[in-house]
Image (cartoon, grey):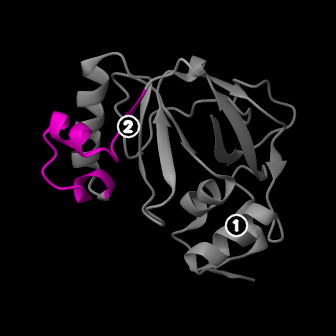
Amino acid sequence: MTLYRVFPYDSNAAPTERGGALYVPPANSGRISNPELYAELYLAGTAEAAVAETFGRLPMWKAADFTHADGNPLALAAYRLNSAAKLFDLNDIAALKKLEIAKPTDVVTRERKITRAWARKIFEMGGYDGASWWSFYNPEWAVYGVWTIATLSRESAPEPLHTRHPAVTAAATSIVRQIA
């Protein structure tokens, strides 16, 4: 399976160093973040979804938005998920019942206390390398949190993003955002 991620890219960094395609940022405020248990990468099932997840909160996308605060360009990378990797599918009714999630909206709520609790349950069940759920921006898109980073390998060189990049224009069209 091919997955995509947008990240601040440093072409001089080794893959697992800051700026590298397989670098795992320190504990953050992510949806499934449980830093005392694991570190995670967030990915999407399509390039368009990865861009939308990154920039969707902005009503207008400007050239400056594609440069990280550290000065590095934001880039899109494709990854290969090992075929043996096992992801917990939160778009499956039986899976939601297994976690005792009462409402599907608890999967994509912006209330991190709720999402981190179900992520913790999945991790503690064992046997899973991460989880998948539907995108806040388009429920037809799958997004992923992978905590077993060794199940990922870079599929292609990262592509710096810009306002005319095909994934950027496709995402903006899909979620109705303006590009300056």
**Mark 2 neighbour density, 10 Å: few (under 14) some (14–19) many (20 or more):** many
The CA span between labels 2 and 1 is: 24 Å
The residue that appears at 66% across and 60% down in the rendered structure is 48
The residue that appears at 74% across and 49% down in the rendered structure is 76
- Image spot of residue 69 (x, y percent): 68, 55
Say above or below: 18 vs 65: above
Say above or below: 166 vs 38: below
Find the magenta span and give its range.
87-108
Q: Nearer the viewer, residue 10 or 166?
A: 166
Q: Which residue is mark 1?
A: 65
Along the horizontal axis of the image, is 118 left or right of 141? Answer: left
Tell whether position 97 is magenta.
yes
Secondary structure beneath dot 2 equals loop
Amino acid carrying label 1: it is Asp
- Image spot of residue 103 (x, y percent): 17, 56
The mark that comes first in sequence, 2 or 1, is: 2
**Mark 1 neighbour density, 10 Å: few (under 14) some (14–19) many (20 or more):** some
Tell whether position 56 is magenta.
no
- Image spot of residue 100 (x, y percent): 13, 40
Image mark for residue 33: 2
**Quarter of the image holding residue 62?**
bottom right
Say above or below: 123 vs 50: above
